Image (tube, rainbow, N blue to C red):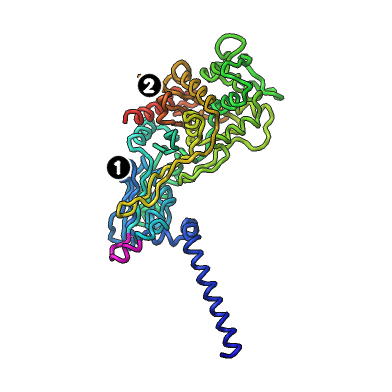
Amino acid sequence: MTKELRRLTTIVILMFLTLFASTSVIQAVSADELAKNPNNKRTLYDSFEVQRGSIIAGGDEIATSSPSDDVYAWQRSYTDAAMWAPVTGYLNPVLQSATGLESKMTQELSGTGSSAAFARLERVLTGQDPKGSSVKTSLDPDVQRAAYEAMTNAGYTGGVVAIEPSTGRILAMVSTPSFDTNKLAVHDSDATNVAYEQLKADSGRPMLNRAIGGDLNAPGSTFKLVVASAALESGDFTADSKLPNPATYTLPGTSTNIHNAGRGTCGSGDKVTIADALRLSCNIPMAELAVKVGDDAIREQAEKFGFNSDFELPLNATTSVYPTDELSDDRTALTGYGQGDVIATPLQIAMVTAGIANGGTVMNPTMVDQVISPDLSVLSETQPSAFGQALDSGVADEMVSLMTSNVSNGVASNARIDGVDVGGKTGTAENGDGQPYSLWFTGFAPSDDPQVAVAVVVEDGGGQGQSGSGNAIAAPIAKQVMEAVLNK
């Protein structure tokens, strides 16, 4: 062999080895990442040719595939479509798009994920048609329905999230108004585009998932839970620590006055305890407390509960925000009752409450329990994991007690359940001069062994402008959700 031929042979071998190594890395290491890339349409195209697996809640199939008589082979359809829209999303080959779990779990549903490699091989060898895996969610149909009907029967705009405190499993995720995902799954391009444009033009913006995103609301007095937690965690305060009790408070360094909801003092006397300020949901003492605790400590506590962090459920949740820049005392005072620069999703507020109910441990929220192959074997299973320890267990127990008093003997009375101790906190967030309030409630039940933590936000004042309250409108919704869990 001549010298030139040996050199050429060596180059060819090296090129082959480089190509082999590159393709191996792509297939073994980068395949899942590339498939999940939203710019990679191949996985979506492949999924149209496969009988996708079902999306399951409880024992119910809420998204299924059936044969179609067109080029796309399979038609996706949704049961109780509007109720489940924030969860399932939709898949449409005409629009070449997918949302919700249809998007985030498309590899699993179409059988193209790495966990289904052996199942794919088996089906090829046996000559069976390709089929995707099913996704079993953590959501409970009865709890979901209770939340959805409570919101829609009253015509409310907003979101509801219910969480199992000990695991982080999401039991309900509701956003209203909603929409019929079946209308965006049809293979008729004209009908699909008309439906899509109508939804885009709808002033109620039904395609937003207000439970985990959308235009975030100020959390109002539900954020007092974070401020009180920061105060108790510091060791410098107890529930019986007393604060000044004026009827008007001037924000530090400004001429701006704030008031309690009733425009008077927080109960009688010239001093009020943290416990009573929380129980009566008074703004002035909590603003004073926020200034005493300090911006840094409140931010640290908020972040321990999940503020300023991103969460994938696997749906992407919009980040809830406590400002990362240093706040002046007047801005810090506003955060004392959840106004100013603080914004949050119902998911985040539910995580605060679930963390308190879970002995101070905040769990990562999840909404997929298992991925199940066509032969019914479990390909993957989600294990509970802790986001972090937000509170000392003793402080968490004290917060549970304070929240229970809010319901039994405070302004959260509409969350009471006969024969069950319930913990909770209302919120009525202001949105600017003349703008309707955002109405909140968050709570857990039962207090001695919490099985569910829930957060509700009702936007646009629940149709009552600035006259509605979290206790009157949001608390009864949360009560129905908690009852649906406890009546199992």
Q: Which residue is mark 2?
A: 420
Q: Amino acid at mark 2?
A: Val
Image: 183 above or below 3: above
> For the point 49% across and 68% down, which residue is it?
23
Image: 49 above or below 169: below
Image coordinates of residue 86 in percent, x first then y, are 41, 43
Mark 1: secondary structure: loop
Dominant secondary structure, magenta: helix
Image coordinates of residue 327 in percent, x first then y, are 67, 32
Q: How busy is the neighbourhood of tag 1: few (under 14 within 10 Å), some, or many (20 plus)?
A: few
> For the point 28% across and 57% down, which residue is it?
67
Q: Is residue 27 toward the left or the right of residue 85 in the image?
A: right
Q: Which residues are magenta?
A: 120-130
User: Do labels 2 and 1 touch, CB within 8 Å?
Assistant: no
Q: Can residue 98 be seen here?
A: yes
Residue nearest the observer in this picture, 293 or 181: 293
Exactly how many numbered labels are in the figure?
2
Image coordinates of residue 446 in percent, x first then y, are 40, 25
Q: Quadrant of the N terminus?
A: bottom right
Residue nearest the observer in this picture, 430 or 114: 114
Residue 122 in magenta stretch: yes
Q: Quadrant of the C terminus?
A: top left
Image coordinates of residue 33 in percent, x first then y, are 49, 57
Q: Which residue is mark 1?
A: 59
- First in residue order: circle 2 vs circle 1: 1
Q: Can residue 157 be seen here?
A: no
Residue 133 in magenta stretch: no
Most extreme residue toward the front is 1
Mark 2: secondary structure: loop
| Label ID, residue 72 | none
